[in-house]
């Protein structure tokens, strides 16, 4: 049974997301929904700090989120962005319940469905399909992470920027330029030059 505070459209969207990968019976879905919480977080709020243990799996209903790390020099490097209707967590920290090496921040006012680590263990125990679902999500995440890494070492920042314009235009419109520059591994000044070059073409 769904929690009364969770909007029905959020639950419907999440069920659709889940059932693109596995099929749950109505009873299995009702049990899954009973374990979900819904939270709203203001912009520029840390969902996770380095050193904390990540205890939640998130499904982004509305908003924009970024993952980043802080180097020894104190410099932030954006790893990637998450748009709505995506499932995310700090993968290593969540799966091993160990301190996170990354941070997760909202870039806009954002709302989430949240499944706790304890709740996921309950689902694993009672609904075998959840093992398959998580495995398929992880395969997609690992493939995406590998693609981002390969792009970062095989094509130029300008080529990556052009690719983002085609494949992820929402991020380009909504994320602060300093974070896009960080994601591309360049300075904001270099990003400004690339943007001016492309605008002049």
Image: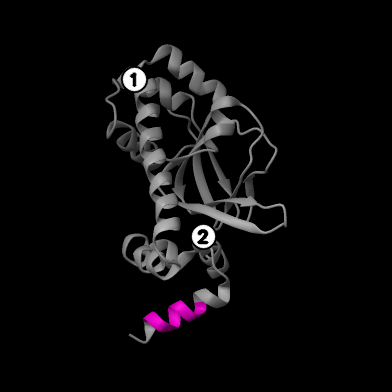
Query: In the rendered image, which residue does mark 2 sit on?
Result: 183
The reply, left or right, for residue 52 in relation to residue 32 is: right
Which percent across, then down, holds residue 189?
56, 77
User: What element does badge 2 sit on?
Assistant: helix
Which percent across, then down, holds residue 1?
42, 23
Query: In the rendered image, which residue does mark 1 sit on?
Result: 129
Q: In the rendered image, is residue 29 in sight?
A: yes
Name the residue rendered at 38%, 63% in the picture: 164
The reply, left or right, for residue 12 in relation to residue 180 is: left
**Label 2 vs label 1: CA separation?**
35 Å
Residue 23 is inside the magenta segment: no
Name the residue rendered at 42%, 12% in the picture: 126
The C terminus lies in quadrant: bottom left
User: What element does badge 1 sit on?
Assistant: helix
Residue 197 is inside the magenta segment: yes
Is 148 above or below relative to 162? above
Q: How is the image coloured?
A: one colour
Residues drawn in magenta: 192-198
Which corner quadrant of the image does residue 33 belong to?
top left
Name the residue rendered at 30%, 23% in the picture: 24
Which corner quadrant of the image does residue 173 belong to?
bottom left
Which comes before the other along the chain, label 2 or label 1?
1
Q: In the rendered image, is residue 85 in sight?
A: no
């Amino acid at each position: 049974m769904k929690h009364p505070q969770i909007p029905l459209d959020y639950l419907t969207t999440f069920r659709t997301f889940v059932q693109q990968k596995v099929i749950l019976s109505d009873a299995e879905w009702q049990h899954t929904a009973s374990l979900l919480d819904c939270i709203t977080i203001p912009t520029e709020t840390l969902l996770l700090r380095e050193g904390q243990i990540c205890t939640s799996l998130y499904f982004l209903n509305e908003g924009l989120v970024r993952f980043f790390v802080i180097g020894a020099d104190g410099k932030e490097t954006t790893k990637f962005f998450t748009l709505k209707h995506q499932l995310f967590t700090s993968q290593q920290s969540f799966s091993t319940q160990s301190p996170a090496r990354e941070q997760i921040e909202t870039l806009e006012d954002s709302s989430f469905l949240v499944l706790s680590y304890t709740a996921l263990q309950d689902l694993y125990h009672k609904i075998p399909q959840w093992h398959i679902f998580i495995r398929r999500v992880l395969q997609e995440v690992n493939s995406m992470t590998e693609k981002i890494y390969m792009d970062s070492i095989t094509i130029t920042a300008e080529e990556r920027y052009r690719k983002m314009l085609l494949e992820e235009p929402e991020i380009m419109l909504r994320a602060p330029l300093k974070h896009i520059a960080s994601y591309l591994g360049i300075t904001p000044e270099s990003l400004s030059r690339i943007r001016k070059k492309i605008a002049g073409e």
